[in-house]
């Protein structure tokens, strides 16, 4: 029997005004996992009504009272570990280790948000006017429109709302059509159970064909004061354009075409382990996944031999199997898209070193290619699947040039046993994040997370997340009467 979920508006579970619903499909079995309400524009307005009505009271709530809610929610997430594992397996084909990773990081996002609530914010300014005290204070914006993606549903669902709420805003979150429960409704359930007041967080679910209209109506509402979007670069451009048209700030965390650079002084066995994790964690469905593996020519033969052997050994298929590393993609159509990228690359002259072939339903085999030409779609397109391309380089200048040859700029890994060498290379690669002697996939709640170029703008994490969802206001206090010229 499929799970049935409604919209969350003003603290109540309510159907869409139209009565319409949408199906949430298990990608591995093809069965309907859940039926959710399919919101229309009128439901978006109801959700913003509720968020706007709740804003003043939430913003004025004592910081330690708000902090207690976040800390309780973090503990609840930890306690629901097995529930999350089942949910993610059914809704997005997530393996159990990936689900557990989501639980741990999401809980810590909530704890970091709790810490941010009571952390000092603002500055005391020197003033030109005698007897005047100047202050720069941080204040919440109002209602924030948040868009929660499906690929790391608990992590990114919590990240969509935690910093805006911690800064004193209220939120309307539009859930991904592929994971409406895990990325939004479950997160809201936890925060409600922790004591979040009614209307502070509202959840909109929708049918896929209505997504563009729902997003446009939400962003256009004059009471929405900021936009928080994580997703593809293509959709992010549209969201950013809507936000700019209404003069609203946006934080956009978009796609990546990330490189892991294996320098000539790297430990090859370590590099193989690191790259395998970077490429195939969550079947490559992470914005930070390593699409391009750049290996110094002196190590290329040994690295390629050991890496392809390891890739060939990875267990693929049922996300519930304890040894599965490469689970299903989010849908059969996603697997077919990845297969089409591989097929096109091979037709253009690329060589398959491991994997390849047709997917089975939503499961695409772990695949390694080499000699992919620039006119192949895969060369510049984000794979967002269990696929990578190996390229070799002769010197650091070439490695840097290839790593930068992309419209994206999210993250990068530089693997080396010489940190000075690694830092010199890393400083030249244009990304928002770089990891020296590590691979490309990492996230910590207190660190500034975000990209440059086509990977978006703005930062999540720590004080940077609070700054993204609050205004700096100049306040002065005069301790004596001023003198005026007329």
Image: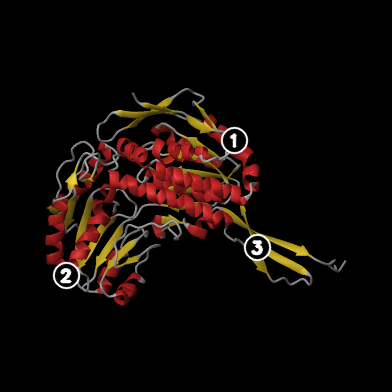
Q: Which mark is residue 297?
A: 2
Farthest residue in the right direction? 486
Residue 462 can be seen in this image: yes
Residue bearing the label numbered 1: 50
Residue 307 horizontal/vertical position (percent): 16, 59
Please determine whether, in this image, residue 374 is positioned above or below residue 172: below
Cα–Cα span, label 1 and label 3:
30 Å
Cα–Cα span, label 3 and label 2:
53 Å
Secondary structure of residue under mark 1: helix
Q: Residue, x 44% and y 60% (percent of image)?
A: 447
Q: Is residue 383 left or right of residue 213?
A: left
Q: Earlier in the sequence, mark 1 or mark 3?
A: 1
Secondary structure of residue under mark 3: strand
Farthest residue in the bottom direction? 420
Cα–Cα span, label 2 and label 1:
60 Å
Residue bearing the label numbered 3: 136
Please determine whether, in this image, residue 136 is positioned above or below residue 420: above
């Amino acid at each position: 029997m499929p799970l049935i979920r409604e919209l969350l508006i003003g603290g109540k579970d309510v159907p869409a005004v139209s009565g319409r619903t949408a199906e949430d499909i298990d990608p591995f079995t093809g069965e309907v996992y859940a039926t959710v309400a399919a919101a229309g524009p009128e439901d978006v307005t109801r959700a913003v009504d509720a968020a706007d009505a709740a804003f003043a009271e939430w913003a004025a709530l004592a910081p330690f009272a708000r902090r207690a809610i976040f800390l309780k929610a973090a503990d609840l997430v930890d306690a629901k570990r097995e529930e999350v594992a089942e949910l993610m397996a059914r809704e997005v084909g997530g393996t159990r280790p990936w689900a557990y990773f989501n639980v741990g990081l999401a809980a810590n996002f909530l704890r970091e948000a709790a810490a941010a609530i009571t952390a000092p914010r603002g500055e005391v300014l020197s003033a030109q006017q005698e007897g005047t005290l100047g202050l720069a204070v941080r204040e919440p914006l109002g209602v924030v429109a948040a868009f929660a993606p499906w690929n790391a549903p608990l992590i990114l669902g919590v990240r969509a709302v935690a910093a805006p709420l911690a800064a004193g805003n209220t939120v309307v979150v539009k859930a991904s059509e592929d994971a409406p429960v895990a990325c939004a409704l479950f997160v809201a359930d936890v925060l409600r159970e922790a004591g979040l007041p009614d209307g502070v967080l509202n959840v909109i679910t929708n049918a896929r064909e209505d997504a563009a209209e729902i997003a446009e109506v939400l962003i256009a509402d004059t009471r929405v004061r900021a936009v928080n979007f994580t997703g593809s670069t293509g959709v992010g451009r549209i969201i950013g354009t809507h936000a700019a048209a209404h003069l609203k700030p946006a934080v956009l965390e978009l796609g990546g075409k990330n490189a892991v650079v294996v320098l000539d002084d790297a430990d090859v066995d370590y590099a193989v382990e690191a790259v395998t994790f970077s490429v195939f964690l969550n079947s490559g469905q992470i914005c930070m996944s390593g699409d391009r593996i750049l290996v110094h020519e002196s190590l290329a033969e040994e690295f390629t031999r050991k890496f392809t052997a390891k890739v060939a050994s990875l267990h693929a298929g049922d996300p519930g199997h304890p040894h599965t590393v490469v689970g299903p993609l989010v849908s059969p159509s996603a697997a077919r898209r990845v297969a089409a990228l591989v097929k096109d690359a091979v037709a253009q002259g690329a060589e398959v070193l491991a994997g390849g072939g047709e997917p089975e339903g939503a499961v695409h085999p772990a695949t390694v290619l080499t000699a992919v030409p620039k006119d192949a779609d895969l060369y510049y397109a984000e794979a967002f699947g269990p696929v990578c391309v190996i390229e070799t380089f002769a010197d650091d200048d070439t490695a840097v040039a290839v790593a930068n040859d992309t419209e994206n700029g999210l993250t990068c890994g530089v693997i080396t046993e010489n940190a000075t060498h690694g830092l010199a290379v890393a400083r030249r690669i244009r990304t928002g994040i770089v990891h020296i002697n590590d691979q490309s996939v990492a996230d910590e709640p207190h660190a500034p997370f975000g990209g440059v170029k086509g990977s978006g703008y703005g930062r999540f994490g720590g004080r940077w997340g609070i700054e993204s969802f609050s205004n700096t206001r100049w306040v002065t206090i005069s301790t004596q009467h001023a003198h005026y010229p007329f």
